[in-house]
């Protein structure tokens, strides 16, 4: 019986080769998208699932609100960890950690010559509680005391083998590892975490190392006694006890903060608090900041968007199948009538039709499996780098089986029910379907076709808007110069040795270099450094979380930051003067920026008071996703405030090589000053462009989804046009004999199509506007949703559909009516 079903199915496929091809191609596109998207979604949802009691693990993050503007930071103030240990009973373990700034690592080599590993970027300060929160397998050492003293370190197995290859883990205990100038002893080796994880740390230096007098620079960064400063590099994980309430613990943390740093009446509306971020949220929430070395942060909205694309493309393929199958129903009427006359019951016919659908879906799945590696390669920039597409993994095979079953039922169920319902007596009298059933089937096909056009036009509109917003973000005046500026990070260990000054002098002497500055991060960057600053005017106090930028007297000149009033920073201003932005001046209550000059800010970044000497125009400190925040420029002197060279290059002539020559000269000087460190640089404008990588990926996906949805829709449209013109061959011939022109017949055959597209346009426009408006809310500064986006999308869809159907309608219109009537 089953064999007979398949035999008949293959005969039917061969008889209707074009329709079968359209169905297979449409379904294979949808299934390919679903398979690739499943791989991505499954990959992202698998992060950090291996830790015991992972639902009780949280990162403590900071929130700020000033003048109605909200801010977030994944870091916390230094004293919080100690306060939690002594004052919050519902917390089982408290693990502070600090991300060190890419130190060079030295281990003993042969003949006493140390071996150096450059710029290790997964090194953190941590204590033993870290390994009680997160599940690691210990290969050597005692987890109870591995990090309980200064100058100790624990290594992951991969890193341990990198440093001390060829010896057992047990013999690595007691070995010396030096991080820049900090000498530590190995007290433990843990197995590198298996599976996907954002916790990619591989060197753990004991947290108490920072408290040693010799490591004062580390201690300064931790700011262990400063409640009003937050550094994104200083973070904190906690594990709650089984019965503890996250809401209650969160309240206790904020009570601790209120007690340590009481809010003032003058600060009404300005808040600083803590919240608990679940471990499962770490991989998906970028607003709290990420570790500098985290390869990527997934976006749940993007994942939902990907799933929607997969569903829509699958739906389009299923719609094609239903449309074409129901349109061909009358051609199979006699077959059904004879089968029922010979004794077949309805259930057997349903099984037969579903088996045909299953075969078409199976062919589409096989094609999709073959296409998946090519698709993954095509989307290399978007696909997670660590994603390994093992298509024969049991989970993927189960997904494919489930997908095949769902698509087969979704595509074949209605046609099977409809076809199996034919009455044999009417069928054999050539009355296969009544007028009501014809009308019902026609309305079904129209409704499904409208659905296709709604989906395709939505993708077109979304693609245009996302592209418009990206263009707006990349070409908007951000308030600073971003072209022809190179940013170079100096080695951490050399920032207090005088070598930075030597390199700075070398840069100034280069003819290709226009100007050089040394300081902290560029005006707009992914890193965040802020502190609570108090302003007193004799009547009130205004306490504000202020973003900090550090630089010398040339910093503002290089980036052409506009000074509204006052003067710029000068040599000797490191403990005296500060420049604020217009936003901060407004928050302080100054209607005119000039009123701020000469006023004093208290408790500024550890300095008791600084005088405001200038007010700069506002600029964007991050991407357009975030609003402009209160900011201050400060002439810093510590390692982390003077570690970045900002190099403005002279203009390059058309087709010239001045910049290439300049970079080569800078690299040569670098090796002379820092012979042990690699020369690495980046252009500032490229860093700005990286802010919008997520949007660029979204735009790329939308472009592909739009193209595929239009392609699938037009495939189905072509199939329906072929069927419709074949059904109306006699009518077309009669009309031509009676004098109808080719244009009149084409218009007749296309009118219904145009009406369907216009109806779909009326449905999708308000839906698309609402969705676009919601997406645009993620930008503090955004482009407008212009009317022409909708007009262009409707026109584009109309032209594509008419062009596709014209292949068949024009062919039918110019056919010889004598042949048409004779064939009838």
Image (cartoon, rainbow, N blue to C red):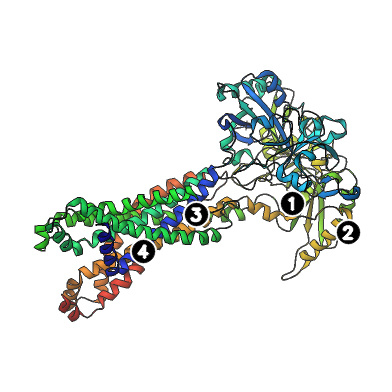
Q: Which of the marked residues, 1 or 4, is nearer the chain's N terminus? A: 1
The residue tagged 4 is 714
Q: Which mark's residue is nearer the viewer, 1 or 4? A: 4
The residue tagged 2 is 509
Q: Which mark's residue is nearer the viewer, 3 or 4? A: 3
Residue 122 visible at all: yes
Crowd rating for badge 1 (residues with CA inside 10 Å; few <14, some 14–19, many 20+): few
> Which image quarter: residue 741?
bottom left
Q: Helix, strand, or loop for circle 3?
A: loop
Whole-percent x, y for residue 579 in the image? 76, 39
Q: Is 697 on the left-hand or right-hand side of 486? A: left
Q: Residue at x 47, y 45 (%)?
A: 304
Q: Which of the marked residues, 4 or 2, is nearer the chain's N terminus? A: 2
Q: Helix, strand, or loop for circle 4?
A: helix
Distance from Cα at disc 1 to Cα at disc 3? 53 Å
The residue tagged 1 is 560
Q: Which of the marked residues, 3 or 2, is nearer the chain's N terminus? A: 3
Distance from Cα at disc 3 to Cα at disc 4? 30 Å
The front one of 32 and 114 is 114
Whole-percent x, y for residue 236 in the image? 67, 31
Whole-percent x, y for residue 246 in the image? 56, 25
Q: Which mark's residue is nearer the viewer, 2 or 1? A: 2
The residue tagged 3 is 391
């Amino acid at each position: 019986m089953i064999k007979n079903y398949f035999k008949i199915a293959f005969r039917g496929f061969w008889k209707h080769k074009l329709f079968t091809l359209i169905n297979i191609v449409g379904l294979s596109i949808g299934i390919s998208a679903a398979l690739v998207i499943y791989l991505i979604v499954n990959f992202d949802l698998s992060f950090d699932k291996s830790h015991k009691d992972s639902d009780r693990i949280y990162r403590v993050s900071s929130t700020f609100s000033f003048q109605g503007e909200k801010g977030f930071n994944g870091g916390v103030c230094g004293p919080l960890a100690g306060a939690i240990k002594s004052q919050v009973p519902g917390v089982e373990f408290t693990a502070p950690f600090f991300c060190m700034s890419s130190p060079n690592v030295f281990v003993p080599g042969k003949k006493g010559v140390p071996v150096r590993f450059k710029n290790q970027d997964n090194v953190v300060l941590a204590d033993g509680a870290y390994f009680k929160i997160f599940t690691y397998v210990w290969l050597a050492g005692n987890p109870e005391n591995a990090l309980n003293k200064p100058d100790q370190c624990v290594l992951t197995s991969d890193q341990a083998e990198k440093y001390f290859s060829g010896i057992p883990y047990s013999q690595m205990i007691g070995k010396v590892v030096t991080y820049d100038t900090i000498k530590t002893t190995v007290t433990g080796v843990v197995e590198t975490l298996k599976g996907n994880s954002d916790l990619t740390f591989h060197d753990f230096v004991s947290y108490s190392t920072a408290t040693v007098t010799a490591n004062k620079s580390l201690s300064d960064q931790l700011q262990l006694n400063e409640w009003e400063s937050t550094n994104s590099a200083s973070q904190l994980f906690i594990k709650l006890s089984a019965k503890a309430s996250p809401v209650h613990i969160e309240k206790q943390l904020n009570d601790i903060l209120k007690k340590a740093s009481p809010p003032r009446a003058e600060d009404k509306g300005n808040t600083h608090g803590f919240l608990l971020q679940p471990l499962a949220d770490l991989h998906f929430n970028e607003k709290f900041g990420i570790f500098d070395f985290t390869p990527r942060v997934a976006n749940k909205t993007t994942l939902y968007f990907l799933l929607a694309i997969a569903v829509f493309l699958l739906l389009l393929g299923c719609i094609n199948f239903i449309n074409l199958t129901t349109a061909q129903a009358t051609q199979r009427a006699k077959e059904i009538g004879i089968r029922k006359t010979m004794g077949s019951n309805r259930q057997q016919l349903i099984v037969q039709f579903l088996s045909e659908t299953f075969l078409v879906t199976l062919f589409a799945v096989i094609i999709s499996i073959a296409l998946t590696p090519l698709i993954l390669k095509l989307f290399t920039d978007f696909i997670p780098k660590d994603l390994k597409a093992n298509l024969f993994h049991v989970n993927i095979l189960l997904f494919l089986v489930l997908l095949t079953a769902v698509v087969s039922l979704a595509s074949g169920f209605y046609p099977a029910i409809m076809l199996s319902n034919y009455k044999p007596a009417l069928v054999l009298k050539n009355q296969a379907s009544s007028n009501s059933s014809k009308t019902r089937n026609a309305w079904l096909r129209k409704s499904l076709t409208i659905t296709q056009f709604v989906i395709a036009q939505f993708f077109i509109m979304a693609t245009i808007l996302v592209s418009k917003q990206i263009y707006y973000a990349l070409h908007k005046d951000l308030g600073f110069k971003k072209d022809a500026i190179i940013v170079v990070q100096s080695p951490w260990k050399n920032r207090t040795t005088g070598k930075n000054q030597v390199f700075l002098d070398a840069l100034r002497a280069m003819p290709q270099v226009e100007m050089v500055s040394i300081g902290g991060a560029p005006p707009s960057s992914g890193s965040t450094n802020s502190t609570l600053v108090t302003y007193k005017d004799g009547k009130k106090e205004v306490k504000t979380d202020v973003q900090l930028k550090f630089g010398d007297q040339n910093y503002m000149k290089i980036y052409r930051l506009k000074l509204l009033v006052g003067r710029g920073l000068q040599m000797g201003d490191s403990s005296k003067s500060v420049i604020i932005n217009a936003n901060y001046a407004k928050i302080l209550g100054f209607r005119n920026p000039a009123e701020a000059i000469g006023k004093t800010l208290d408790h500024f970044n550890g300095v008791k008071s600084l005088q405001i000497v200038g007010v700069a125009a506002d600029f964007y400190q991050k991407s357009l996703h975030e609003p402009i925040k209160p900011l201050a420029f400060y002439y810093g002197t510590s390692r982390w405030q003077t570690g970045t060279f900002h190099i403005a290059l002279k203009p390059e002539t058309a087709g010239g090589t001045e910049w290439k020559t300049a970079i080569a000269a800078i690299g040569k000087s670098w090796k002379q000053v820092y012979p042990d460190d690699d020369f690495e640089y980046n252009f500032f404008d490229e860093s700005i462009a990286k802010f919008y990588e997520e949007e660029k990926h979204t735009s790329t996906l939308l472009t592909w989804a739009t193209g595929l949805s239009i392609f699938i829709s037009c495939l189905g449209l072509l199939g329906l046009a072929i069927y419709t013109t074949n059904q109306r061959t006699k009518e077309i011939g009669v009309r031509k004999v009676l004098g109808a022109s080719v244009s009149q017949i084409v218009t007749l055959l296309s009118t219904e199509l145009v009406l369907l597209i216009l109806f779909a346009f009326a449905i999708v426009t308000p839906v698309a506007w609402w969705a676009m408006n919601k997406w645009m809310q993620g930008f503090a500064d955004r482009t407008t949703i212009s009317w022409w986006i909708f007009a262009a999308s409707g026109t584009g869809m109309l032209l594509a559909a008419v062009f596709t159907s014209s292949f068949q309608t024009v062919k039918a219109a110019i056919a010889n009516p004598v042949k048409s009537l004779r064939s009838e």
